[in-house]
Image: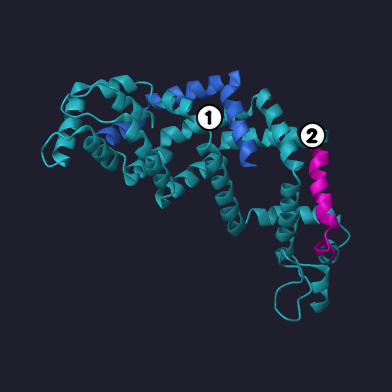
Amino acid sequence: MVLAVAWLACERPEDVRVDFQRASLQIGPNMRAAVQLPEVRTAVNGLFSGLGTDPAVAAAATHLGEQLRRDRALSASLSAVTAGAARSPRMAHIYTALLKEAHGRNVGQVANEKVQARWNQPEVTTIMRAEENELLQNALAATPELDELASLLVPDLDALFTDKQRLRAWGRRLTALDGNRPPAAAKATELYVQTAWAPARIAALVAGLANNAALRQELASTLAAVLALDSVSDELRRTVAELAADPELRSGAETLMLDMLEPTLDLPRCKRSSAPCGATRTWTAASDSSCAG
Amino acid sequence: MDRRIRQLVRWLMRDPSAARIVRYRAGRIAADPTVKKLFVDFLDGW
């Protein structure tokens, strides 16, 4: 968008004029269409996944996680999630199975190990990363402050968009696209948006940036440095505390915890199917009567 | 949750220490010739 504004606002050959207002309205939908394309999603997922596994980012995140774990108020909120899961009727089966496997060890510790092991399995990490990435992408797409960041990334816009040779080439291209006649403003705008800002071209740019090694390295360094700031850990602590207190999120976390444990245990089988008792999210105490035990 | 993450991103962009780091790194990205080439190809390659 910043690029379009700069180009459309600058001086161009008199014979080819573009209506900025109209173009900016048309570019928005093209950008939204572009970010939905599979190549963009794959590239951005790869970018986020790469950041998560970068050694400097991982070290900073681990340090931050330790700080968060030491926070008493936060521990209390997170313990409430575990306590909620422990009260669930599904937990009765799980607890019995855990007890059988614990052989005298702490049941909570055994449960923790099982969740950790399951968490790292590819079928779980793939789903979780896709969910996290989608959440992040949606949140970032709706954050106007990111326009500031975009202008930092292309600081020499003026030089790029006032290069006379380039402007003449664009004018010639628009003229060629309109049957070798200099198009009127409305037509030039339409041609420019359709061609230069086609969703496939935007997607190629975004994917190219997301896959760029230099950009990835700088983003990882940025993230590691930002995570190490005290002011950031304070703000993250407030964010996590607020999220942990959200009843809907808490309920989701409890369900997730139980869903993660169930496949790792030898639970009693239902008479009507091979699924373990309590294996579905809609399990109720009433359905327990159909279990073989 | 989306709302809270957006708030967090906004906060990050306004926090002076975080903003300084972001500006510095953004400058390095902008100066990288491979990144510049992506933008120039996008501008000229239609």
Residue A102's quadrant in the figure?
bottom right
Q: Can the viewer see residue B45 in this picture?
A: no
Q: Quadrant of residue B39?
A: top left
Q: Give me the C-alpha separation between circle 2 and circle 1.
A: 25 Å
Quick one: which chain is blue? B
Residue A6 in the figure: left or right of residue A145: left
Tell me where residue A210 sits by quadrant: top left
Residue that label 1 marks: A221
- Identify whether A269 is placed above or below A118: below
Image disc number at residue A70: 2
Q: Mark 2 falls within which chain?
A: A
Q: Is residue A158 visible?
A: yes
| Residue nearest the viewer, comparing A110 with A276 | A276
**Kind of residue at disc 1:** Ser
- Is residue A192 shown left or right of residue B12? left
Dot 2 or dot 1: first in sequence order is 2
How crowded is the residue under tag 2: few (<14 C-alpha within 10 Å), some, or many (20+)? few
Mark 1: few/some/many CA within 10 Å (<14, 14-19, 20+) = some
